[in-house]
Structures are given as C-alpha cells and as structure tokens.
Image (cartoon, rainbow, N blue to C red):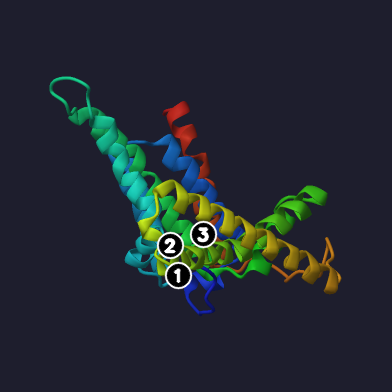
Amino acid sequence: MLSYRPGSSLAHRLDPRSKLLVQFGLAVAAVAYPTLPGVVAATAVGLTALAAARLSPLAVLRSYRVVVAVLALAPLVAGVALGPPWFRVEPALRSALYVGRVLPILFVSAAYLVSTPVRETRAAVQRLVPGKPGQLLGVGMALVVRLFPLVLADVREVRDAIRARGGERRPVWVRARLLAVRSLSRTLDRSDRLSLALRARCFAWNPTLPALAFARRDYPVALLGVALALSPLARAFPL
C-alpha cells in the first residue's frame, strides 16, 4: 500500500494545494474526453506526476493490482454477447477507453500520497474549504490516509492466519465469514484505541497546522490543474 515517503523530489517540494488542483483537473478532463487522444494525454500527465515523485509505474500497478485486475475485466465483459458473433469488438474497445481514463488518475493520486505528509494534506483541505466543514473534511482525510493501510494490513494478517490453520479446506462462504468477522473486530478495536489516543493527546479540531505557501514552481502546476479543470469548456464553446 502506498503511503508518504520522505524525499527531495520535485513532487515533495510542491505545495499540496497545487497537487490537489492537478488531481481534480485531471479527473474532470479524463471524464470529459473519453477518446484515444484524451486517454493518451491524461496518461502522459499521470506518468509525468510519477516521474516528479520518483515513483515507478510498475510499483503503482502492483499496489493497485486488485483495482487493475477488475478494470481489465471490464472490456471483456462489455464485449461478450449472448449470441453470434459471441464477442463484439466495438463495445469492448469503447469500454477499454473508459477504463483507460482511470489509470492516469491512479498515477497522480499515487504520486500525491507518496510525496505529501498527512498534516500538509489536512492543512491544504482546511484552507481550501473554510469553517467547520473544512475542519471535518480535513480530519476525515487525515484519519483515512493513516488508518486505511493499517486496516488492509489487518485483513491480510487475518487471511494468512486462516490459511495457516488449514482454512483453505473450508467452504468459500465459511472463509468469507471468518475473514469479514475477524477483520471487522480488529477494525473496531483499532478505532477504540484511536479514540482513546486522541483523547489522551487532547485532540483539537483546529490545531496549529503547517504553514503553506506557493513557490515559483507551484504556479505552473496550479495553472495546469486549472486548465485541465476548465478543458471541458473547449467542447462546450468551440472556436
């Protein structure tokens, strides 16, 4: 699972708000242009983000291998027909284009996760969304980013424990029930410990967050994000 790694890459030195703008803009542009040139352009932006974070595309694909496997099945399912010719190429290609829009977004998100500390993410969110909603959203994002990898690790430990005890010989529904119940129990225990830890540390809704400031390198990135977000207007109002 991808998480923050200290470093000195270009992505590490960028303001989190400029990186969030690029993520948002790329998501808007990818949805607005489900064509081959659009997917190629979005993929180029995603690969550039990975290069800026010094992150390998193969490492990202391995981390999201379950998501990638599900996405890879979509064109096959879309092309299947219940009668002759049994497989239609055009729907499969159209589905592949739609699926291809997701990978660049995953690339940019992975670059953000690896290059941005959780505290900076919370600070960026609370500055972009003012008031109590921003504080609630910032706390929620911080907790999700911190806890989600731990929850996944708990699920893997439970799965490995079931296998070590000969669980593979049991029916699938029994294994699924054991995995779900034990994983949920661990997650609830972890949430109780988190609640106690927050109270022990005098959790505050509005703590002193890291100071954020745009540098010269942030302005081109932010302009790219704004341009991507506004790119659908070029289709709505062609010259």
Q: Would you place residue 235 above or below residue 216 in this image?
A: above
Relative depth, front residue between 219 and 3 = 3
Residue at disc 3, secondary structure: helix
Instruction: Tell me the tag on residue 220.
Output: 3
| Identity of the residue drawn at 51% across and 56% down | 179
Q: Amino acid at mark 1?
A: Ala
Q: Toward the viewer: 106 or 239?
A: 106
Density class for disc 1 (Cα within 10 Å; few <14, some 14-19, many ≥20) is: many
Q: Earlier in the sequence, mark 3 or mark 1?
A: 1
Between marks 3 and 1 in the image, the one whose residue lies nearer the viewer:
1
Quarter of the C terminus within the rendering: top left
Secondary structure found at label 1? loop
Task: Look at discs 3 and 2 and give the one toward the viewer.
Answer: 2
From the image, tell me which residue sits under label 1: 53
Residues at marks 3 and 1, CA–CA distance in whole angstroms: 16 Å
Alpha carbon distance from label 3 to label 2: 13 Å
Q: Earlier in the sequence, mark 3 or mark 2?
A: 2
Q: Is residue 213 visible?
A: no
| CA gap, disc 2 and disc 1 | 6 Å
Depth order, front residue of 19/64: 64
Q: Give, as a three-letter code, the residue at label 3.
A: Pro
Residue 49: assigned label: 2
Pinpoint residue 60: horizontal percent, then vertical percent.
Answer: 39, 63
